[in-house]
Amino acid sequence: MIEFKKVGKIYPNGVEALKDIVLTIEQGEFIAIIGLSGAGKSTLLRTINRMHEVTSGELYVNGVNTRELKGKELRSFRRGIGMIFQSFNLVNKTTVLKNVLTSRVADMSWWKALLGLYSKEDKLIALEALDQVNILEKAYTRADQLSGGQQQRVALARTIAQQPLIILADEPVASLDPITATQVMNDFKKINKSSNITVI
Ligand code: ADP
């Protein structure tokens, strides 16, 4: 459960992006935040995983006051929250599978991560995630050879392989044509239903 308790955010330059936000989101909900450009949607999303610090009020995620997290606890908290952007942020010159596997790096020892020595379990998790978004047959294709919609599916698979409780998606289909956008949104809905992941 995510609870905003009178959350405010004032950026260092004085812009008040959020004011007294009171909002409760249950685990497994599929939520859309709608508003004009500059209304504060991105800021709101980014306070949930502490990419941005709130400046007043309290924000709880699964009973944890996010303002109190630091160091190792903060890093492991962030791992439970996936983030998807309008730009897909894939590594272009490498395969789809390797892109998805990058989400497993946080749980590996540094030298295995450096050498790309992923375990069989990690590979199975990554392939399963690709299957969930219907793009398994592209596992060994280079990321930059895919269409925009396919690339966003890979980004979604990468996030699923991170096994998060929450996915924060900031305008995930804004750069796609309407038909592809609908298909990608349907993938989000499917993942939300089948895995009970909160999608915002
Ligand atoms: P939206 O996602 O709804 O378009 P944003 O959350 O990006 O809105 O922005 C909300 C307000 O905060 C805007 O006025 C924007 O200019 C401002 N803002 C966003 N990011 C920053 C930042 N890093 N520093 C200062 N002001 C910012």
Image (cartoon, grey):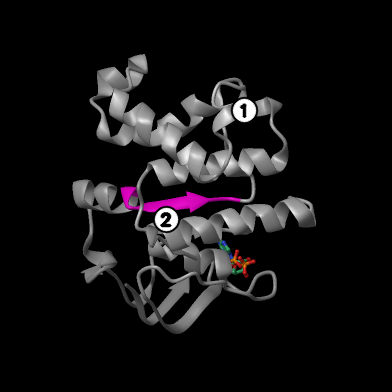
Q: Nearer the viewer, residue 52 or 75?
A: 75
Residue located 62% across and 58% down the image: 185
Per the rendered image, the range of residues in magenta is 79-85
The quarter of the picture where the N terminus appears is bottom left
Would residue 7 appear left or right of 171 to someone viewing this image?
Answer: left
Residue 148: % across, % down = 71, 41
Q: Quadrant of ligand 1?
A: bottom right
Q: Is residue 115 visible?
A: yes
Residue located 36% across and 75% down the image: 26
Residue 132: % across, % down = 49, 44
Q: Nearer the viewer, residue 94 or 51?
A: 94
Would residue 71 appear left or right of 151 to someone viewing this image?
Answer: left
Neighbourhood count class around disc 1 (C-alpha, 10 Å): few under 14, some 14–19, many 20 upward: many
Q: CA distance from mark 1 to mark 2?
A: 26 Å
The residue where tag 2 is placed is 51
Neighbourhood count class around disc 2 (C-alpha, 10 Å): few under 14, some 14–19, many 20 upward: few
Q: Nearer the viewer, residue 100 or 81?
A: 100
Amino acid on which disc 1 is placed: Ala
The residue where tag 1 is placed is 143
Label 2 residue SS: loop
Q: Is residue 91 visible?
A: no
